[in-house]
Image (cartoon, rainbow, N blue to C red):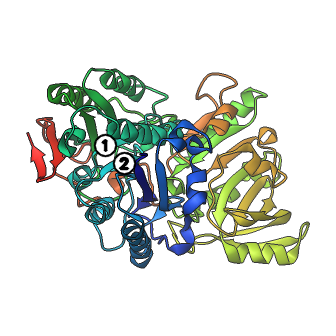
Amino acid sequence: MRPRIGIGGISIESSTFSPHISGDEAFTERRGDVLIGYYPFMADGSELREAAEWVPLLQARSLPGGAVARETYERLKAEILDGIREHGPFDAFYFDIHGAMSVVGLVDAEGDLGTAVRDALGPDVLVSTSMDLHGNVSRTLLDVSDLITCYRMAPHEDHWNTKQRAVHNLLERLRSGVGSDDDARRPYKAWMPVPVLLPGEKTSTRIEPARTIYAEVPVAEARDGVIDSSIWVGYAWADEARCQAVVVTTGDDVEAIREETERLGRLYWDARDDFAFVADALPLAESIDAALAANAASDARPYVISDSGDNPTAGGAGDVSWTLGQLLARPEFADGSVSVVHASIFDADAVAQAVAAGVGATVSLEVGGRVDGGPSGPVAITGEVFSITDGDADAGTQVVVKSGGVHAIITTRRKPFHHIGDFTQLGIDPNAMDIVFVKIGYLEPELYALTTGAIEGERWKLALTPGGVDQDLLRLGHSHLEHGVFPFDRSGTPALRAVVTRRTAEGIEDL
């Protein structure tokens, strides 16, 4: 008989330093066949699809943003719990989360959700949890999970592989011949917090030291008696005690998982001073100067600059307009001889005004700063309505307003710009632009490819701009982190000892 496996979770990355609130409108909610179809490795006829009777309940996923409205969280949580009670019992559960969800009024949202899911499932059901490596693994979340894993690449080019690994490990454990009783099926987990909290832009696996450290993860996993090993960077833009790096290794050989967890954790700790931004990180003005100098010296185009402080894919509000104001004030761009595109600011009122005026009309708008005023509030722009594009699933209606050489993209709703097609659908060819600004940290693959025609990094700067995901963590004002977390506290050296634990029928067993 095939095992019955439920699927559910809530996935969002939430900055507690952003005034944005993520409500019902922020989430894409998948249920039933739509949820099963979301996972490419569960296509009809696939081995994993046929291996179990899958019961897809609810997986709600949102673009990163501010903290989740409490009523939205409670509604989604209640539906998952009601689904477990209505459609259970289950042999196992796939818990698909991000790990960096903050909820208004809670301090460990995934721990709260995981505990409620565990209580509804009962003690005998195996739970496999998949996460983003920028998530946080509190002891509470660890204890409600039997298996737990995360991405091994940043950018997250392995996100589907990770989810598939979580499901594969769950099925393997259900089939396991380790023992006949339920306790023997539950692996041991070695968990070790590493008191380091860094932004993702300093921990990209494309560069050292993260590249070498993460290359050791499959080495650890390959040891006899080990099921999985993972390193979480943690989420830097939430002010919660659980926010720090963590290593977890699961398996049946207690000493092996302890040794590998401590080995990986020490590698991470020892490299704490070596982590550097994935690109040259400079103030905005210096980033622009570098772009102009590079373009004067070469015919290569474009030069890419990350407007990192308001990155919506890290939790920024997406409407901080300070950078746009700085671009409009630069005399180099006023006469149109240098072409610049800025993506983007969401402002439904400004979009509506531009649409009412029509393509080719001259408009004077106050743009952005409605949700996160940042240091500038709304910014004034006068220019030509260059294009109007309706129907984007994320952004809604999008307009481009051209002022001198600056092409300002304004959207009805929050949207990250990661792909060339995001620009070309608006009538903008980023390859023909002198400078491309995107609200992002490290570049996603298509944008990264724009910068690699010459020496890696030569045509890309990470601008240290203000916003809810400011890369300068020390100026954000964290006050709830654990004692000793680097770089906020450099006063001591941690013991770096793994806790080895397992969930049994009687409760949590620590060795």
Which residue is under mark 2?
129
Quarter of the view holding residue 63: bottom right
Which residue is under mark 1?
147
Nearer to the camera, 297 or 80: 80
> How dense is the environment of label 2, judged by Cα within 10 Å: few (below 14), some, or many (20 and up)?
many
Q: Amino acid at mark 1?
A: Leu
Upstream in the sequence, badge 1 or badge 2? 2
Residue at (21%, 29%) from the top-left corner? 257
> How dense is the environment of label 1, judged by Cα within 10 Å: few (below 14), some, or many (20 and up)?
many
Residue at (23%, 26%) from the top-left corner? 260
| Res 150 visible | no
Where residue 214 sits in the image (x, y, percent)? 38, 28
Where residue 483 sits in the image (x, y, percent)? 16, 51
Label 1 with label 2: CB-CB less than 8 Å = yes
Q: Tell me: residue 508, above or below residue 379.
A: above
Nearer to the camera, 414 or 286: 414
Nearer to the camera, 222 or 182: 182
Where residue 433 sits in the image (x, y, percent)? 78, 42
The label shown at residue 243 is none
Nearer to the camera, 161 or 311: 161
Q: Tell me: residue 400, above or below residue 178.
A: below
Q: Amino acid at mark 2?
A: Thr
